[in-house]
Amino acid sequence: MKRTLVVVVVTLLTLATLGFAQDRAQPSARSEERITREVRHELLMLPYFGVFDYIAFRVDGSTVTLLGQVARPSLKSDAENAIKHIEGVEKVDNQIEILPPSPMDDGLRIRLFHEIYGYPPLEKYALGVQKPIRIIVKSGRVTLQGVVDNDADKNFAGVRANGVPGIFSVTNNLQVVPSK
């Protein structure tokens, strides 16, 4: 009887250990959702993450891949450092591109900001700390990233950006997500 009890206990412990090891190797969808929420939060809390930076990410199990472009080199490492301590994140693949320093691009960024966020139909997007329309400028080429409430706002932003002198091209990647 004692021997049978010992065998049952050892078997249960072995199965529990194997199950635990399997759970650690394959994070559940619920675990990925939690990691996604925490990564989003940590990135939004970065102190120098501004309207001229765009950071996206992808969660694949315990690996987080960072994507996008930033104007400040320190923001790339700050983003990686902010998320590598999150429970469940075992690897960070930092593919964020650092935009080259350029006085011409800096001037374009300021003019674009005023053209887009100073336009009355788009002023509502200027409220709040994190601006939903991201303005990425690389060698005179502009990419608009982020979200707006409707197609008209997306088109307004694109037209306003195209109207700034000195720009070679504008790519409008704004997504339309109606506000609730």
Image (spheres, rainbow, N blue to C red):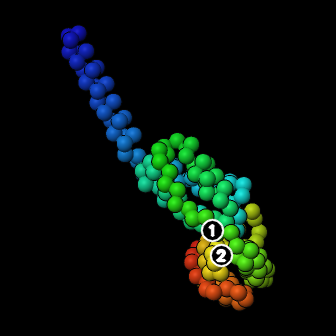
**What whole-number distance in Å separates the C-alpha atoms at marks 1 and 2?**
8 Å
Q: Position of residue 97 (x, y in %)?
A: 57, 65
Q: Position of residue 28 (x, y in %)?
A: 40, 47
Residue sticking out furthest to the top: 2
Which quarter shows the C terminus? bottom right
Q: Is residue 118 above or below residue 130?
A: below
Residue in the picture at 73% in, 89% down: 165
Q: Nearer the viewer, residue 33 or 73?
A: 73
- SS for callout 1: loop
Residue in the picture at 55% in, 46% down: 84
Q: Nearer the viewer, residue 28 or 67?
A: 67
Q: Earlier in the sequence, mark 1 or mark 2?
A: 1
| Residue 87 can be seen in this image | yes
Q: Amino acid at mark 1?
A: Leu
Which numbered circle lies on residue 5?
Answer: none
Q: Nearer the viewer, residue 87 or 149?
A: 87
Please report contact status of discs 1 and 2: CB closer than 8 Å, yes or no.
Answer: yes
Q: Is residue 120 left or right of residue 93?
A: right
Quadrant position of residue 146: bottom right
- SS for callout 2: strand
Q: Is residue 51 left or right of residue 143?
A: right
**Residue underneath mark 2:** 137
Q: Position of residue 90 (x, y in %)?
A: 47, 44
Q: Is residue 61 left or right of residue 133?
A: left
Q: Amino acid at mark 2?
A: Val
Which quarter shows the N terminus? top left
Q: Position of residue 80 (x, y in %)?
A: 58, 51
**Residue underneath mark 1:** 99
